[in-house]
Image: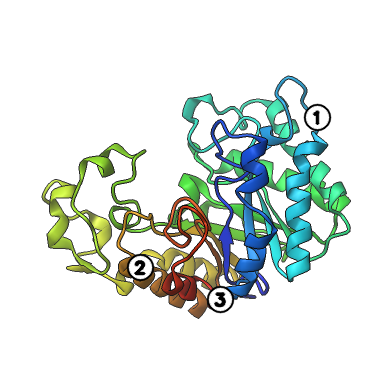
Amino acid sequence: MKPLYGYMAGANLGHWISQYGNQSEAHWDSYIVESDIERMRGWGMDHIRVPVDYFLFESDDNPGVYDENRLKYIDNLLMWCKKQGLNLILDLHHAPGFFFGNGAKNDLFTNRQSQLRFINIWKFFSVRYRDEGDNLIFELLNELVWANSDPWNQLWQETAAEIHKLSPDRRIIIGGNNYNNVHELKNLTVVDDDRIIYNFHFYEPFIFTHQRAGWIPSMVAYKTPVAYPFKVADHLAFYGGKAPEYFNGRDVVDKRFLADYMQPVFDFIKEHDKTVYCGEYGVIANADNESAARWLSDMADLMLEHGIGHAVWSYRGFSAITAPDNQSWNQPMVNAISRH
């Protein structure tokens, strides 16, 4: 497998121009600024993944018309990254007709008009950024959740073909089903094209990485702090008294558990000899900092050992890498995520 050089250690800019709630210009103008990009370069990172929601720049009432005043946030970020020598992944986090949390409301795979809007957005970006080189990668869709992968395999190939008509050398990231689950890589169509990069996300075990997460009822209900590594017996109450099968009979959740769980990724690499990337991994700020740093370090070890580039979730918001006021950061975590 050819490692994704230049994209080996990065961070997501979550909750800036994606999943920003009711925020608007005041938030977009201040949440991420040029000094943040300078900081991440100073940490030793080589790239940034920026999630973007389509309705930042396109209205459902006027599809196909793109707001230049909103697109400036992407333009500015690209300029800042180039100035700092950082590469950029442009991730369509919420697409016309699809968002991973919308369930039955999604129609991207049943409505041709939504598909055409999706394709046209990427054609637009292909022309807008056609002069950019390997410093920019397109990630077509974040965290597919659908009954099966067939309609996505058809749509991403159609979209990639349209992109390559306009920007022939553009590298493209595509991810698997069930929130880019490691077990879904095998269901992606593998093509003989080095411009296509295969993506997974990793937050295992959820009881640790998402402990007491306010949007997950089972996590809210389980008040016991979870360290890392941890003994499975200490948290059987969360699982109803019996360890789930994915612990594979292990008594301790540690680096070996992470490696076992990631095995489908390693198998995919061995079978297909394709470039693989981890677009998201991370630990919620509710975890203790020392445990979070250990988990992040173990993850970095495993991914670097197998040549897998990666971007932590997230520079701000989810994790405790940076303080809520964005004035300080946790150096052990930074050390763990910046190695490449």
Residue type, label 2: Leu
Rendering coords of residue 172 (x, y %): 70, 56
Task: Return the residue at label 3.
Answer: 307
| Disc 3 residue type (three-letter) | Gly
Closer to the eye: label 1 or 3:
1
The image shows residue 91, relative to residue 337, as above or below, that is above
Question: To which residue does mark 2 refer?
Answer: 258
Q: Is residue 135 visible?
A: no
Residue placed most toward the observer, 101 or 268: 101
Q: In which quadrant will I find the C terminus?
A: bottom right
Q: Amino acid at mark 1?
A: Gly
Q: Are marks 1 and 3 in contact (CB under 8 Å)?
A: no
> Mark 1: which secondary structure?
loop
Residue 308, x across and y down, in percent: 55, 71
Across and down, in percent, residue 162 comes to 81, 46
- How much space separates mark 1 and mark 3, taking CA atoms? 39 Å
Mark 1 and mark 3 lie on one chain; the one further toward the N terminus is 1
Extreme-top residue of the structure: 61
Residue at 60 percent of width and 42 percent of height: 18
In the picture shown, does residue 177 fall above or below 307?
A: above
Which badge, 3 or 2, is on the more N-terminal residue?
2
| Labels 1, 2: front one | 1
The N terminus lies in which quarter of the figure?
bottom right
Query: According to the image, what is the colour scheme of the structure?
Result: rainbow
Marks 1 and 2 sit apart, C-alpha to C-alpha, by 43 Å
